[in-house]
Image: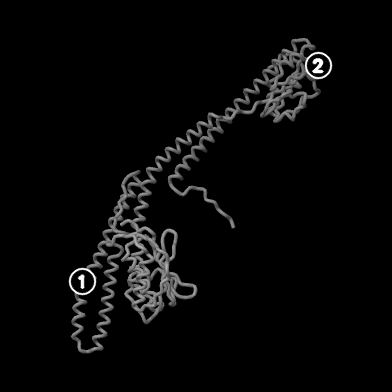
Amino acid sequence: MVMRFKVWPRTLAVQLIAVTGIAVALSNLAVAFWFEYGNQQQSTTSIYERVLDRAAATATTLAAIPENSRHVVTTSMSSRAWKFTMLPVPAHPLPMTEDEHVLAKRLGTMLPDRTPHQDVISVQLRKSVGELPPEFVPSQPVPTSGVIQTVVPVDRNTMLSAVLLRAPEPWPLEIFVAAVVAILVASLSAALVARRVVRPLSELTQAATQVAAGGNAVPHVDEAGPDDVRNAAIAFNAMTAKVTRTLDSQRHLLSAVGHDLRTPLTAMRINLEFIADDELREGLMRNLEELQALTEQVLAAAKGAGGERPRNVDLSALVESLCTDLDELGEPVSWANHSPAPISCRPNEIRRAVRNLVENAVAYGHKAEVRIADSGDGYDVLVEDEGPGIPEGDHQRVFEPFVRLESSRNEATGGTGLGLTLVKAIAEGHGGIVNLENRPGGGLRARMHLPRMAPAG
């Protein structure tokens, strides 16, 4: 199994700062490399000229003094970086590369015209002191980045070996300091730009989350920042206002229809009392009661998650009270005790949602087992039954209005098809979620997750 470590930042602000810093660092690195390369080339040419000039001047000086005094001169001119040594004339010049041949030819032009043995002049560019014989190395060599040796004729019988130990190139501190300053300035500029972009986006995200969670409050995003972000905020505010108006219109329509249906339903109930045929009257009464239940569900769905103010309650006590009431009515409901579960919610709505889940479990699954489970940021209300369950493909469809799956659960029962729709609206109105899952041993489990704090609204 290959483990992948994600080191790239996920937020836009940090990404913008990181990209800017990396870009500035790479550009400074390229400039520093190019500058250092040119500087090194110039420095190398200057060193070569200095070595050749000194070797030619020293050989010319030695040729002008007595032979028995030359050792004193070479010793006095040697140092930790230079070493001058007298040696006999070689039979052949030392092997040289093309660059070394060029330097040797240049050295020959710097000697007097009558200097003998110019054909054995040589220049050696070596990488380390270890490539030279010990007698040609200074007694206390300095740290080096290379060695330059020149072999120059002094007279017909003597040659001069001049060795220079090149000092290491100093670290380009100025370039490094300039690069650090450039990175800091660019990163600070990127942070200021990111703040102007990210802050409105964060507000937009919070507002979108608030809208998705439901509630009565309509968030308004500050229409500020760069044009692209400001236009997005304007479009979001317009969309939110339009969606809110649409939802309010639908809610008012449902509420009006539900209220208007109550009056003729009441009149029909009164008129049914005058029907003499008992069988006909009972059949019509059952149909009327079903229509009455549907009307009440429509009114409940129209109210949605609004109207009631959130309060701090004990969710465990609220659910236990509901289960006790249903048990006293003869419903097969069992409750598993739970420690206090403090939560901020609209208690009447939560009670209605849990009651719908329990009644569904009893109607379609013969019994309801209710319990509460901690889930980190909130609590899960679990309602389990012993029915046949629901096909996986219908787990989301049953939350749609007026959808009923009696054929897949119990053909002897029915419903309005709004119970689970109302449960979903209430759960999402509290910033939670509800879902269904088939139990491994048979039956259905309804899980309604509620956060500890209700969303503002």
Q: Position of residue 299 (x, y in %)?
A: 26, 69
Q: Is residue 258 visible?
A: yes
Is residue 405 shown left or right of residue 274? right
Whether residue 204 sits left or right of residue 277 in the image: it is right
Q: Residues within 10 Å of mark 1 (few under 14, many from 20)?
A: few
Q: Position of residue 60 (x, y in %)?
A: 72, 13
In the image, which disc is placed on residue 300?
none
Q: Residue at x 70, y 18 (%)?
A: 55
Residue 354 quadrant: bottom left
Place of residue 385 in the rendered image (x, y in percent of width and height, measured from the top left): 42, 75
Vertical arrangement, residue 173 with respect to residue 59, above or below: below
Q: Residue at x 65, y 26 (%)?
A: 167
- Contact between marks 2 and 1 (CB within 8 A): the answer is no
Q: How many numbered circles does the render carry? A: 2
Up the image or down, 147 lies above or below 396; here it is: above
The amino acid type found where label 1 is placed reads Asp
Is label 2 or label 1 in front? 1
Q: Label 2 amino acid?
A: Asn
What is the CA distance from the residue labelled 2 to the residue labelled 1?
A: 130 Å
Residue 428, x across and y down, in percent:
36, 62
Location of residue 41 by image quarter: top right
The residue tagged 2 is: 157
Of the pair 14 and 64, the residue shown nearer to us: 14
Is residue 394 visible in the rendered image? The answer is: no
Q: Quadrant of the N terminus?
A: bottom right
Where residue 260 is drawn, which disc sits there?
Answer: 1
Q: Depth check: 356 or 152 in front?
A: 356
In the displayed structure image, the side of residue 11 where residue 159 appears, left or right: right
Taking the spot 27% from the left edge, 72% from the top edge, the residue there is 296
Mark 1 secondary-structure assignment: helix
Q: Residues within 10 Å of mark 2 (few under 14, many from 20)?
A: few
Q: Secondary structure at mark 2?
A: loop
